[in-house]
Image (spheres, rainbow, N blue to C red):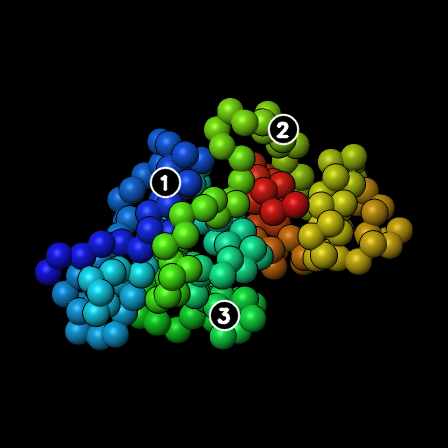
Amino acid sequence: MAFTVAPCLRALFAEINSIAPARSKATDGTIGDQAHQQRKSDHNPDDHGVVRAIDVTHDPAGGADMAVIAERLRLRRDPRAKYVIFNRRIASTNTDWAWKKFTGSNPHTAHMHVSVVADGRADDTSDWGLGHREGAVTPTPVPPEVVPGETSDNVLTLQRLLIRLGLIGDSPANRDRHYGERTQQVVERFQRDHGLRPDRKVGPKTWATLLALS
């Protein structure tokens, strides 16, 4: 059947493409496949022929890190959005946009799923506020890798980021420039929550995710 994708989702695709023009689109999706058609899904056209969900490929190397983008969408609580799924977690209007475990058959590790409301708000094509466009600002330099047991100014930068994000409290003990067990546990939990390797090493991907969310 003929269908159209909700205008706000077309705008979301365009915004992500402008942020990451060379990103992979291997698992991008709009209208549902045969499996989706056998069940209720926002990937299926509604009574007006409108598809109200998209999938966007997770491609950190291409500038499209869905861990970062999904978190930005969650934090913004855009009235057009109904729910976001990525990496075995779902955040929605029903959970006041808190992350919850997603138990569906597809863990959504290869892409992010976004569903939107079925009313006039979905016609709003304004900016989703996902970040700066390419060339708009100079990217924040990524500090060198931080490894467990290290004591350095880079660890202090890390601790200040964790404080800013509300992951640790603002106290002298959490600004001691030492990457000890307490800080490592916070980093490991952050890595798991954002689909990163939970090795406690703060390398380029972990730095980039922290800086993008700060």
Give the Cα distance between marks 2 and 3. Answer: 35 Å
Residue 106 pos. (x, y %): 32, 65
- Quarter of the view holding residue 112: bottom left
* Residue 179 visible here: no
Sequence-first tag of 2 and 1: 1
Q: Disc 3 residue type? A: Thr
Q: Name the residue under label 3.
A: 93
Q: Name the residue under label 2.
A: 141
Q: Which of marks 2 and 3 is in front?
A: 3
Q: Do the residues labelled 1 and 3 touch (CB within 8 Å)?
A: no
Extreme residue toward the left, this view: 1
Residue 11 pos. (x, y %): 37, 45
Q: Residue 14 got which mark? A: 1
Secondary element under disc 3, as helix, strand or loop, is helix
Total of numbered circles in the picture? 3
Residue positioned 14% across, 65% down in the render = 34
